[in-house]
Every structure is written in structure tokens, then in C-alpha cells.
């Protein structure tokens, strides 16, 4: 299956619900609205055989947060979806691809994305005493330089 | 679910984060019934350094060196993946000689990483003579890497647009000589691992990851290939000159630690042949093109087969000299669910406490992740996943 096949199969199955197709050699990027996101991932995993989830990239776009899982082994299909920043809720794909669990938890830790249906959305990378509601990869979070432990000036 | 232990109670055994077995901080929380591990949990939040955010605060040149320091052992894989990624934004052709040098150094780094892991595995099973032998031979590769790149560990060879140094003809000769030596030694180690009673007794049937689970849990790298799945980024999504350099994807079908040992030994032998091929077929020409500091607006996803498995870098550029988003997914992070599966007794498959170090080491962990507990309701024989606090409440600890 090459890039064009994936694009045409997706268009056939979802019509104009999927958009913003971008292809490069062995890469396909496209947009699916949040309400169809899980359905699209399920279609890719179960019908087209993209059972391997490489990673989930979450990006702060300003007013929205983009969630983008990268699926596949040789050919990589990236499904992007965007949710509002004040209510960043997406359906979890853990029941379709169980290996997605750690990646969803990472996105939850770093950008505060809520994955509806993930039974174990707990801290994974941040320490236990990290303040609640502070997400290191959000734009409004400012970096604080480390303080000297002794000697020197702050 | 039934367990043959005579103990009536579950015990928690926390191992780490300061470790007798590993040099990196990790907390292994094991719930044991007698000698058998019934649930395993890994907590690796001790090593998070915020590299992704730090990369978004630095320019593309500074980030090469930051990417290199994500992992000391896979530094070549990280810089390669980073540089490919940024080059992908420019849409530029990299000189062929540079790509050959990249593959050459990458394969040398793979040999050194696999030999390092073999030594550690030998140490975990209490076979320290093998550990000393292997690490002695690994020094030959380290010397070569130093000679080619100028540095022993953080090689700093890859840069955006090519490589920083050309390779000299006399270095190539020494490299070929060292490859002959290493091939002989690696074949000897393969024989040892296939025939030595200690290795076989400690590795056979330990840390089983079935094919179905390996797919389901998205395992990567040698862990996946030891479960009989033929997947290697170098073959499935060839980058640099991997479409020209011939090699075989090694798979074994016994799903256990011994299979992972043999996969890595065979991959070392494949890498030795690839190094030879690269030296013999290296074209002449420039090794670098100069690129502007700010790449055009766009995004790119780059993938590399690091020694530990598939490595993913994603970049989103906004036209300035700093990336808008940089995402790194290391192979160990992808293997964490598979690791928890390996360390959990199920049906006839039992994990003894003594097998935990080698089963854990068999994924070649390089830490960056997890915090999860699997709970066991004994009367109903049911497993579910919950938090540590939930476990405390459930067990009346408060």
C-alpha cells in the first residue's frame, strides 16, 4: 500500500470529514475532527493494518491543542485532530491499540490533554510533587532557570 | 489464575531507584506471591529533564548538541534522526559520501551498544568473565569511533547538511582490520551463548513476550524481533543509504531473553558486514552542504533504527531559527508496556524474582518514563490497572 492508496481509502470511507491531506515519501498527514478521530484510528488499525502506534505528538497551537498519533511501520500515517485549549478532551484509543497508553499519559502530563476512556491517565514523566495544572509544554508556562544550591547569587 | 506458591500473602518489593543492578535511576515495584511476581510496575519519572521544551528554546545548531545528550549510548542515532529531520524541512540533497559516513558511524555505534548490552546481560546472569571479555573487545569499537569522529562517546559527527569530518584511508584500513577481529570474537560469543549451560539456564523461557502481545503493546527493536516480527526501520523505511547497504533483518521465534541475546549478536554480525560494505563502496566527494540557519515553515517526521529500537523525532518549524515543536520518542518508552507484560506471571508462565533483573535488562532499558500498577484481585483471579494510591486504599494502608 502506498501513500495514494491510503489517501483514497480514507476519502472513500470518511468523505469530506477528513481533510488537509499532505503526503511525502512514506508519510501521510491529515486532519480528522475530534468527533471522528477515534473512528479514523480504528479504521486505520483494523481495516488498513496500521496496528503499530509510534508516538502521539501533542502541540500547543495557541487557542487549540493538536493531538497527532503516528501510526504504522513502514508507511507512517499521522492523524491530526485539534481540540480547544480550555477543554482539551479527546477520545482515548487505548481499547483499539493498548500500546497507546503510555503515549496518552505523556500527552496528558505535558499538555494536559484529557483522553476520555483511558483507565489509567496518571503521571508518567513528571515527578510526583509537580504542581497540578502546570503543563511544561504549554506556551503560557514559563521556564524558570535553576537556582544555585549554595554560594552564588540568585 | 492459579499460583503454585505456598505463601498466602502478597508482598511488595520495591527495587530502586538507587539500584544494585542498574546504573540509571528506576523504581521497579513488584508485587510477589512467594517467589513469583504477580504484578509489576515501573516508575522512571526520576530522569525527566525537559529536553523537548529545552529544544524549543534553542536554535537548530545548538539543538544538535542537545539531541546528542538525550542518550549517551545512542548519541549517533539521536543526532542522525535530528539532522535528517531538519534537512527534511529544507528539501535538500545530502552528499552521498556524507550519508555513507553516517551509516558507517551509526553501525559502529550499534556494534558498541549491542556489545555493551551483552556485557551487561552477562553480568546480570552472574557470568562476569563473559562480561569482562565482551567489554574488552568493545574497546576496539570505541577506539575506532574516537579515531573517526574525534570523540569516544558523544561523537558529534552528524550535523545539519552532512557530517563534520571526512574519513581518512588509513582509518578505513584499521577499521577493516578491527572488523575482522570483532567478527571472530562475536562468532565466539554466539557459540558461548548458544552452548553454555549457565546462559541457557538463565535465559531460556525468561521474560516471554508473545507475538500477539508484542504487536498489541507496540514493542520496538530487538524486543519485537525476538518475538518473530520482521520489522526494522532500516528495511521498512530506509533512510540515509540503507536502501543501498544490504543487510538481513534478524528474527527469532522463541520470544524469550535468549532470543533477544541472539538477535543482538546476529545484528552485531550484520553491522560488521555493513561497516565493511560502507568502507568498500564509499563514493568520493564533499561531506557537507551549508544550509541557512532558519529552515522554511513546515513539519517533518524522521525515524531511525537506534540500537534499542525505533526512534522517532518530529519537528514543526515556523520559519524562525527555533523549532516551534520538537518531539522525541525514545525506544525504551515504547517498550514499557511490553516490559510490564514480561514481568507478570500468567497461567503457566511464572516470573521468579531472580529472573527479574535479566528480564528487565532484556529490553535494553535506557530510561525515560512510566508509573503504573497492575492490581490483582485474588479471589476472582482478575487483573486491573490502577494507581499506587488506589492500591494503598485497597489494601488498607491509608
Image (cartoon, coloured by chain):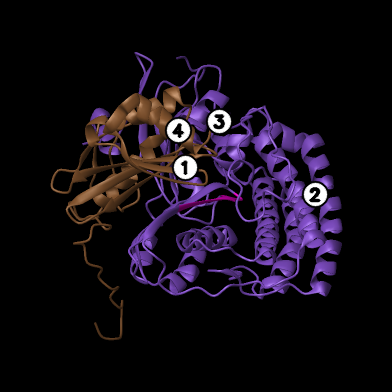
Chain colours: A brown, B purple
Asked if disc 4 and disc 3 are in contact, CB closer than 8 Å, the reply is: no
Label 4 Cα crowd, 10 Å radius (few <14 / some 14-19 / many 20+) = some
Against B166, residue A89 (above or below) is above
Query: Which quadrant of the view contains residue B378?
Result: top left
Q: CA distance from mark 4 to mark 3?
A: 46 Å
Q: CA distance from mark 1 to mark 4?
A: 25 Å
The residue under label 3 is: B352
Q: Residue at x 79, y 59 (%)?
A: B281
Asked if disc 1 and disc 3 are in contact, CB closer than 8 Å, the reply is: no
Q: Chain of mark 2?
A: B
Q: CA distance from mark 2 to mark 3?
A: 30 Å
Label 1 Cα crowd, 10 Å radius (few <14 / some 14-19 / many 20+) = many
Q: CA distance from mark 2 to mark 4?
A: 43 Å
Question: Residue lying farthest bottom?
Answer: A152
The reply, left or right, for residue B127 in relation to residue B195 is: left
Discs 1 and 3 lie in a common subunit: yes
Considering depth in this image, is B68 or B394 the residue closer to the camera? B68
Label 1 or label 3, whichever comes before in sequence order: 1
Instruction: Give the x, y percent position of residue B385.
Output: 33, 29
Q: Is residue A96 visible?
A: no
The residue under label 1 is: B334
In the structure shown, which secondary structural element does the residue marked by tag 2 occupy? helix
The residue under label 2 is: B186
Label 2 or label 3, whichever comes before in sequence order: 2
Q: Residue at x 24, y 36 (%)?
A: A33
Q: Residue at x 51, y 17 (%)?
A: B347
Of the two numbered discs 2 and 3 in the rendering, the one whose residue sits closer to the viewer: 2
Discs 1 and 2 lie in a common subunit: yes
Q: Is residue B304 magenta?
A: yes
Query: What range of the chain is rendered magenta?
Result: B301-307
In the structure shown, which secondary structural element does the residue marked by tag 3 occupy? loop
Amino acid at each position: 500500500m502506498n501513500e495514494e492508496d491510503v489517501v483514497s481509502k480514507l476519502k472513500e470511507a470518511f468523505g469530506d470529514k477528513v481533510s488537509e491531506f499532505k503526503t511525502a515519501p512514506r508519510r501521510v498527514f491529515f486532519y480528522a475532527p475530534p468527533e471522528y478521530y477515534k473512528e479514523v484510528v480504528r479504521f486505520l488499525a483494523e481495516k488498513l493494518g496500521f496496528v503499530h502506534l509510534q508516538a502521539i505528538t501533542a502541540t500547543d497551537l495557541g487557542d487549540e491543542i493538536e493531538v497527532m498519533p503516528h501510526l504504522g511501520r513502514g508507511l507512517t500515517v499521522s492523524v491530526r485532530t485539534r481540540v480547544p485549549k480550555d477543554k482539551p478532551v479527546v477520545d482515548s484509543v487505548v481499547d483499539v491499540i493498548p500500546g497507546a497508553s503510555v503515549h496518552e499519559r505523556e500527552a496528558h502530563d505535558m499538555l494536559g490533554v484529557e483522553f476520555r476512556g483511558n483507565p489509567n491517565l496518571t503521571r508518567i514523566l513528571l515527578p510526583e510533587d509537580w504542581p497540578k495544572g502546570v503543563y511544561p509544554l504549554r506556551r503560557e508556562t514559563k521556564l524558570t532557570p535553576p537556582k544555585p544550591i549554595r554560594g552564588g547569587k540568585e | 489464575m492459579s499460583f503454585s506458591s505456598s505463601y498466602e500473602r502478597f508482598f511488595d518489593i520495591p527495587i530502586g531507584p538507587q539500584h544494585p543492578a542498574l546504573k540509571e535511576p528506576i523504581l521497579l515495584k513488584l508485587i510477589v506471591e512467594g517467589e513469583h511476581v504477580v504484578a509489576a510496575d515501573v516508575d522512571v519519572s526520576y530522569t525527566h529533564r525537559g529536553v523537548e521544551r529545552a529544544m524549543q528554546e534553542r536554535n537548530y545548531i545548538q539543538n544538535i548538541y542537545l539531541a546528542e545528550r538525550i542518550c549517551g549510548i545512542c548519541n549517533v542515532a539521536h543526532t542522525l534522526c535530528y539532522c535528517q529531520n531538519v534537512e527534511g524541512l529544507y528539501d535538500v540533497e545530502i552528499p552521498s559520501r556524507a550519508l555513507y559516513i553516517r551509516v558507517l558511524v551509526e553501525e559502529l555505534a550499534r556494534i558498541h551498544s549491542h556489545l555493551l548490552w551483552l556485557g551487561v546481560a552477562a553480568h546480570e546472569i552472574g557470568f562476569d568473565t563473559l562480561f569482562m571479555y565482551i567489554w574488552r573487545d568493545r574497546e576496539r569499537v570505541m577506539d575506532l569511533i574516537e579515531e573517526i569522529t574525534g570523540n569516544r562517546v558523544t561523537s558529534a559527527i552528524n550535523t545539519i547538511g552532512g557530517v563534520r569530518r571526512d574519513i581518512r584511508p588509513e582509518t578505513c584500513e584499521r577499521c577493516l582490520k578491527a572488523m575482522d577481529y570483532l567478527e571472530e570474537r562475536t562468532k565466539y560469543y554466539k557459540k558461548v551463548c548458544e552452548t553454555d549451560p549457565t546462559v541457557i539456564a538463565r535465559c531460556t523461557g525468561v521474560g516471554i513476550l508473545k507475538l500477539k502481545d508484542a504487536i498489541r503493546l507496540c514493542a520496538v527493536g530487538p524486543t519485537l524481533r525476538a518475538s518473530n516480527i520482521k520489522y526494522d526501520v532500516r528495511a521498512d523505511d530506509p533512510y540515509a543509504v540503507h536502501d543501498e547497504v544490504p543487510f538481513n533483518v534478524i528474527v527469532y521465534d522463541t520470544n524469550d531473553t535468549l532470543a533477544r541475546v541472539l538477535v543482538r549478536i546476529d545484528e552485531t554480525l550484520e553491522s560488521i558486514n555493513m561497516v565493511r560494505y560502507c568502507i568498500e563502496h564509499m563514493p568520493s566527494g564533499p561531506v557537507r552542504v551549508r544550509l541557512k540557519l532558519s529552515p522554511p515553515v513546515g513539519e517533518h517526521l524522521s525515524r531511525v533504527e537506534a540500537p534499542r529500537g525505533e526512534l522517532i523525532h518530529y519537528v514543526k518549524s515556523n520559519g524562525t531559527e527555533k523549532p516551534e515543536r520538537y518531539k522525541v520518542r525514545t525506544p525504551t518508552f515504547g517498550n514499557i508496556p511490553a516490559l510490564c507484560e514480561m514481568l507478570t506471571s500468567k497461567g503457566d508462565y511464572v516470573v521468579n524474582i531472580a529472573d527479574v533483573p535479566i528480564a528487565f535488562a532484556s529490553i535494553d532499558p535506557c530510561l525515560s518514563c512510566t508509573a503504573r500498577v497492575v492490581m490483582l484481585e485474588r479471589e476472582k483471579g482478575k487483573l486491573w490497572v490502577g494507581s499506587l494510591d488506589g492500591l494503598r486504599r485497597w489494601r488498607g494502608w491509608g
